[in-house]
Structure formats: structure tokens, C-alpha cells
Image (cartoon, rainbow, N blue to C red):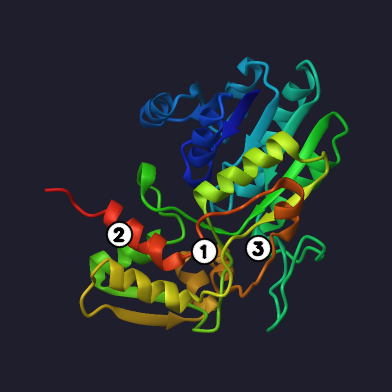
Amino acid sequence: MRVFVTGGTGLIGSAIVENLIHHQHDVFALARSRASHEMLVRLGATPIRGDITNPIAWVNGLPDVDAVIHTACDFSDQMPRIDANLLDHLIPALHRMPGQIRFLYTGGVWSYPQTKPGQVGDETMPFSSLPEFDWMIAGLNRILGDEKLHGIIIHPGCVYATGRNGHTGLFERAITSAQSSKMITIVGGDHVDQPMVHADDLADLYYRALTNAKPGSSYIGVAINGVSNAAVAKLIARHFAIENCQFETISTQTAMARYGDWADGLGYHQHLSSAKAMRELGWDPKHLDIEQDIKACATAMMPTS
């Protein structure tokens, strides 16, 4: 299969690119810099020079593909306009290609409401998106509503990685703060649990959805529930050997003032089930021990002598 990936050097996209190439697919991915180009070549993909902010510059030169996996995203307040403009140009280009294109669009668990104590949510819950992520709902509805595309939606949990290709994802802010100032900020208090997933397990979910999901399907991608923000912070301090590390607990309002409105999600308490993906696609995540993964991350990032 010939697959075009946006965000192919990012946290999620790079893991997907590696997974697809491992399964002998031909991968094309956007490269907005020389470093991105070199990374994609190293991974085995074919780089396409350009980025999602200016699709008109590259979209008409896109080679014919069988599928698109859209993972490119940032947390800027321009993302609603950027994503809508990308789809404005990309979708017509896909319509001109032979055959019906499978389009995997990335949503997110912050499109769903917080869960109550004892509640486990799934794909049947109505959306109740954080305002900063309403654009995802608009985008996924656009993909699912296009009769010329085979739309499939993946809603990742909070994604982390263990250092490969320089990615740590969910851990990055805490690791950087701990190493630079011996301080880790915990958003929302000890009671906040965020559903998590390792990028490699998530990449496997995308691969399974690409090859087996029915058009119109949506899947939550979560492997770990019930681990609090505070527990993650303490594990990072321990395994990165940060002596006398301090822990600062702040409200979501303070987090939003510091990092942007998107940070409201850092205090979002959710327990979510991926039973649908396991049942329909045979998804079987391997990374289920967050402490072992944080330990592995620390080992991977340890300076070499």
C-alpha cells in the first residue's frame, strides 16, 4: 500500500512511519526542514518537501496513494485555521486520485468528557470537547462525511515515547523541568488520572485500522488507565535521579495561563476503554507498565561517555 503521512517526524507520525515500513508499505511524508528530510530518509520513507501551513505549495504534486494518515498538529491558536485549510486543499487532490482513498484522521481523547469515579468511557460517549480542540470535531466530521473517502478516526490517549528519535511526548515537560530546575509541575492535583498510550502501541493501532477497519469507524487508543499525574511526576524524578526534586501542584487555570488554553486538558480526569479496538482489530498493546517505560526512557536519554 502507498501511504502519505502528515507529521511523519513527530511523536506519533514517526512511530507510524517505522511501523508501516516494517510491514513493507511505501511511505511518503512531509518534510519541512533538512533535518526532517534526513530523518525520513533514515526511516525509509520518501520525503515530500512542505508543511501543513502551506498545502497549496505541495498538494498538487502529491503522488498517487492508497491512503492518508493525518497526524500533524500543534497546540497553537492557529491550528483550527491550519487544519481546515489543509483539508480544503488535500481532499480535492485525493478525489482526483484513482480509487477510493482511506483517510485516517487523528482526533483525541480530550474530545470526550471527563469521567466520574468508577466510570469507564468508550466511543459511545457523546463528544464534549475542550474548546481548544473543537477543530478536531469539525475535521473528523468532514472526513467521515466525505463519500469519496474511506474515513477512519483514531482518538489517541496521552501519548508518550521512550526516547527513540528524540521523542518522549507526555513526559517531555516534566523531564526538562526536573533536569533544569529540580521542579516538576503537577496539573490539577493528585486525583487527576490521564489515559496513556505508548507511541509504538498507537502506531500498531493505526496500522491495524489502516488495513482492517471499516469505513466510518472510530477507535480510542488507550493502554494505561488509573495512573495519576502526581505518580508520573514522582516516577520521573526517581528514575531520572533528580535529587531533592520539588513538586508544584497548580490548578488548570494556572496551567492555561502558563502554557496556553490547551493546557486545560492536563487536568482532565479520564478512564477510557479501548475494548472496541481490541475486539474489532485485534489490538494488543504491549506497553502496560508506566514505571518500566519511564525507567527505559531515562536509560535511553542517559548521556554517553
Crowdedness near tag 3: few (<14), some (14–19) or many (≥20) residues, C-alpha within 10 Å: many
Picture residue at 61% right of the left edge, 52% below the top: 284
Q: Which residue is mark 1?
A: 260
Crowdedness near tag 1: few (<14), some (14–19) or many (≥20) residues, C-alpha within 10 Å: some
Sequence-wise, which precedes: disc 2 or disc 3? 3
Q: Which residue is mark 3?
A: 110
Indicate the position of residue 124 as horizontal and vertical percent values: 82, 63
Indicate which label's residue lies in the foreground, 1 or 2. 2
Identify the element where label 2 is drawn. helix
Q: Amino acid at mark 1?
A: Gly
Picture residue at 39% right of the left edge, 59% below the top: 172
Vertical comparison of 61 with 150: above or below: above
- Image quarter for residue 206? top right
Q: Amino acid at mark 2?
A: Ala
Q: Which residue is mark 2?
A: 298
In front here: 208 or 263? 208
As drawn, the label of residue 22 is: none
Vertical comparison of 250 with 301: above or below: below
Outermost right residue: 147
Q: Is residue 90 left or right of residue 203?
A: right
